[in-house]
Amino acid sequence: MATAVCARLLLQRSTHGFLFSSRAGPALSSPFLSRAHRLDPSDDEMYQRTSVSVMQKEPGSGAMIYSYSSKGFNIDGNKVLGPCALLPPAILQWNVGTHKDITEESVSLFHMLEPRIEILVLGTGSRTERIDPSVLALLKRKGIAVEVQDTANACATFNFLISERRVVAAGLIPPPVSTALSLKQE
C-alpha cells in the first residue's frame, strides 16, 4: 500500500517537471537508474547522449563542458567538432585522432601557457588509454599534473576542477560511435 502511494506521488511529481529518484522503489526501478549499473556502449542512447546541468555558473569561473557525443563537444554553448583543447583563455581544435597521437609536440601548447596550468585533464575516448611515458615525463618536468581518463570522466573532472577555480586545461578526444546495437537489413 505504501509503495503504491509513493509510486503514485512520484508519478504526479514527474509530470510537473520534477524527476524521481532511482531509489524510488521497485515499481519505478530500472537497471539504467540504479547506482550499480555502469553505462557502456551497449546501452546506446543513454551512453551516447550525455549532458550536464549547471544550476548556476559563477561569473569568470571558466568554460564548462555541457555535453559530448561521438561528433564533439558543447562547451559553454559553443559546438566544437572533433578533438579539442580547452585552455584557460580559449577553446581550440586539437590535431589528434586517437590517444596514440598524443605526443610531446601535441601537448606543447599546454606547457607554453601563461599563467601556467596546474592540471591537464586528458580524455582518451571511450576508455582510459595509456599515454606515452615520455609525454607524461615532459609535463611532469614542466610542473603540470596530468589526469588521464576516458572522455566521460575527463569532462566531469574538468568541470569539477573549474568549479573549484583551479588553473586547469583539457585535451579531449570524443568517444567513437557505438555499433553495439546496430540493425542489419536482411
Image (cartoon, rainbow, N blue to C red):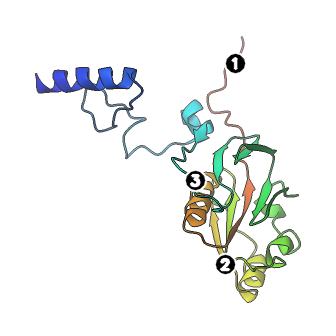
**What residue lies at 31% left-to-right and 27% top-to-bottom?**
28
Residue under numbered circle 1: 184
Q: Amino acid at mark 1?
A: Lys
- Does residue 31 sit above or below 59 in this rendering? above
- Does residue 29 sit above or below 162 in this rendering? above
Classify 10 Å Cα crowding around label 2: few (below 14), some (14-19), many (20 and above). Answer: some
Q: For residue 118, which numbered disc appears in the image?
A: 2
- Residue 32: x %, y % from top left: 43, 35
Q: Amino acid at mark 2?
A: Glu
Residue furthest out toward the bottom? 141
For the C terminus, which image quadrant?
top right
Image-quadrant location for residue 19: top left
Number of marks: 3
Image-quadrant location for residue 4: top left
Compute the Cα span from label 2 to label 1: 48 Å
Residue under numbered circle 3: 57
Q: Nearer the viewer, residue 115 or 58?
A: 58
